[in-house]
Image (cartoon, rainbow, N blue to C red):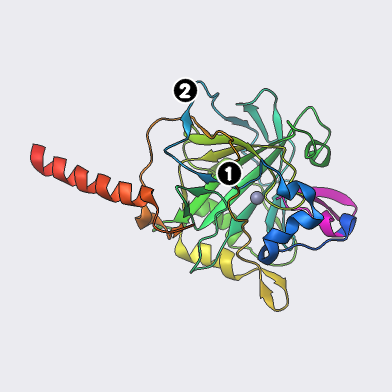
Amino acid sequence: MCEVFRAGGVNFISLYIPTAESHHGHHWGYTDQKAWASAFQHCNGKSQSPINIDTRTAVHMPRLPSIMLDGYDLTDQPTLTLKNNGHTLVLKLPGSMRIVHGFDEVFIADHLHFHWGTIEEPGSEHTIDTIHFPAEIHVVHYNSKYHNLSEAATMPDGLAVLGAFIGIGLHENDNYEKILSVLTDSNTQIPGFNVRHLLPNSLDRFYRYNGSLTTPPCFQTVNWTIFNDTIRVSRKQLASLEETLKVDKNHRLNKNFRAPQLLYGRQVQASFSSRPLVKSKYGQHRHVTNQSSSVKDSQSHNRLLVFFFFFFF
Ligand SMILES: [Zn+2]
């Protein structure tokens, strides 16, 4: 998820960096993920992202500081640039948006982007107990002690990314509609809005681990926060993300997610203790491997709840 790209003389870093092509002369894509490491050595590292989050082994840390955001409530002017960079959909964000509590330093927002699949294949990058969600949003911030995203991206304490899962709900999501109703392959200016509303209502329940950009050059400089609560958009809205954008004339831009990477002993922390149930009724979930034990667990848990309901009432 991170390379620096230049557009109109301006440096952008997305956690996708088209500079991989312009600066290193290497193209990369999602169909040859195993080949990334031959051109980008960090992609072979031992702190790579995304990962599968195993809720049974995540360590509850009651003293994990809560996340507090500032400046997310934007006014409609100035407008924001929405861009298809060939790997993802990027919304450039103003530096007035910050994470002001939750880390040792203040982190400044740079942009947000998405990962998604197809109607058949859910496309979140992180998984919970091996389950994929239909899509995932990443809000990318850099440490305020550095000058910009490109400088911070190479520093061990450089980046903080807020990630959240996007599932399917019954209703249209008005906040996501501000982006999903104007999708086009050309750069688009959209009015500013409250970007906080693209994240889950609760920011209190999250997982935390040290990882990397999920695209070349895979720098291992990201402090990841993955929220437990899922955002809902309508099936129609998700379809617009899955079916509108193109990589080139003949190819749709979708399935832009990297496979989960090995942990190599890393610890995943959780700000909360209760183990979430898998709520498959809200979305289309996919198993990374075979039938996960967590699904079986939650099914038997549900049966247990039904039993207690009838026994006690
Ligand atoms: Zn990303």
For the point 32% across and 51% down, the residue is: 296
The residue singled out by tag 2 in the image is 62
Looking at the image, is mark 2 or mark 1 earlier in the sequence?
2
Q: List x then y, in percent, for residue 18.
A: 80, 57
* Image x and y of residue 262, in percent: 59, 46
* Spatial CA span between label 2 and label 1: 20 Å
Number of the label disc, if any, that sits on residue 163: 1
The answer to whether one can see residue 194 in this image is: no
Percent x, y for residue 292? 40, 53
* Relative horizontal placement of residue 124, taking residue 218 as reference (left or right): left
Kindly tell me whether mark 1's CB lies below 8 Å from ligand 1: yes
Marks 2, 1: nearer the viewer: 2
Badge 2 density bin: few <14, some 14–19, many ≥20, Cα 10 Å: few
Answer left or right for 305 relative to 260: left
> Where are the magenta residues, as a range?
1-21
Residue 28 position in % (x across, y down)? 76, 62
| Point 65% across, 67% down: residue | 253
Q: Is residue 4 left or right of residue 73?
A: right
| Quarter residue 26 falls in | bottom right
Asked if residue 55 shows in the view, the reply is: yes
Query: Is residue 298 shown above or below 107?
Result: below
- The crowding category of the residue bearing disc 1, from other C-alpha atoms within 10 Å (few below 14, some 14 to 19, many at least 20), is many
- Quadrant assignment, res 152: top right
- Which is nearer the eye, 100 or 259? 259
Kindly give the residue lying farthest to the top in the view shown: 63
